[in-house]
Image: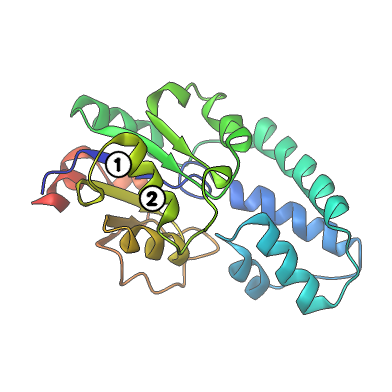
Amino acid sequence: MAIKAVIFDFDGVIADTPSAWLGSIGEFMKKRNVELTQEDYENLVGKTFSKKYEILKKKYGLDIDYDEFWQNTQNLARKKVSENLPLNPGVEELINSLEEKGIILAIASANSRRNIHLITDKFNLTDKFSVMVDIHDVTEHKPSPAVYLKTAEKLGIDPKECVAVEDTLLGVESAKNAGMRVIAVPGKFSKDVDFSKADLVVESLEELNAEKIISLGE
């Protein structure tokens, strides 16, 4: 079946935002005398913010106020993202390559639209995406297929005609559960994950172009 759309996860795919968000969480916890481990970071990546909060509170038995946790970590992370964070290598080139072939682009993310726009507005990419579906658009989150099914529905395209680009196992499972083909691009927090469920695994978006993605539908 021909590929008509490419749906990008946001965090870790468009930019290395997990480093900003998880780094901010690490700084918050360190002030409370908790040093997060690499295993902690790997366990948190790809999960919703509220799930991250639940995991840390349960593991470390800390009396952490959610609003305080959210406010402090979000403000610091947004500052890092808006001031210093570049796009991941190959993002702009891949988007341009797909546009030239008439492939429709979208974002399906467990983040908020406000945070997505910190990057897409900064690099003039917002208008490149026909649809953005964020955490507020669905009630079930990855690995549930809800976010990808909602994106395909908004695009008016059969999920089988879509390719998702993901950097976490939860995201790969979500897109596969939606019936899509999936490309995995492991990030620094998911480099040791078994991505055998993906249709294609690449080290960087620089390895991709429109032709290679379109060939997944052949």
Q: Is residue 50 left or right of residue 35?
A: left
Name which quarter of the figure residue 66 lies in: bottom right
Residue 13 location (% of width, % of height): 46, 47
Q: Nearer the viewer, mark 2 or mark 1?
A: 2
Q: Is residue 55 left or right of residue 7?
A: right
Q: Please, is residue 203 above or below residue 86 in the view? A: below
* Residue extending farthest left: 218
Q: Please, is residue 24 above or below residue 42 in the view? A: above
Q: Helix, strand, or loop for circle 2?
A: helix
Give the labeled residue for mark 2: 148
Gap between marks 2 and 1, in whole Å? 11 Å
Give, as a three-letter code, the residue at label 2. Tyr
Give the labeled residue for mark 1: 6
Residue depicted at 38% across the width and 62% down the height: 172
Q: Residues within 10 Å of mark 2 (few under 14, many from 20)?
A: many
Q: Is residue 42 left or right of residue 169?
A: right
Residue 211 location (% of width, % of height): 16, 41
Pick whichever, 156 or 53, lies toward us.
Answer: 156
Residue depicted at 32% across the width and 58% down the height: 178
* Precedes in sequence: disc 2 or disc 1: 1
Q: Is residue 205 left or right of residue 71?
A: left
Pick whichever, 200 or 49, lies toward us.
Answer: 49
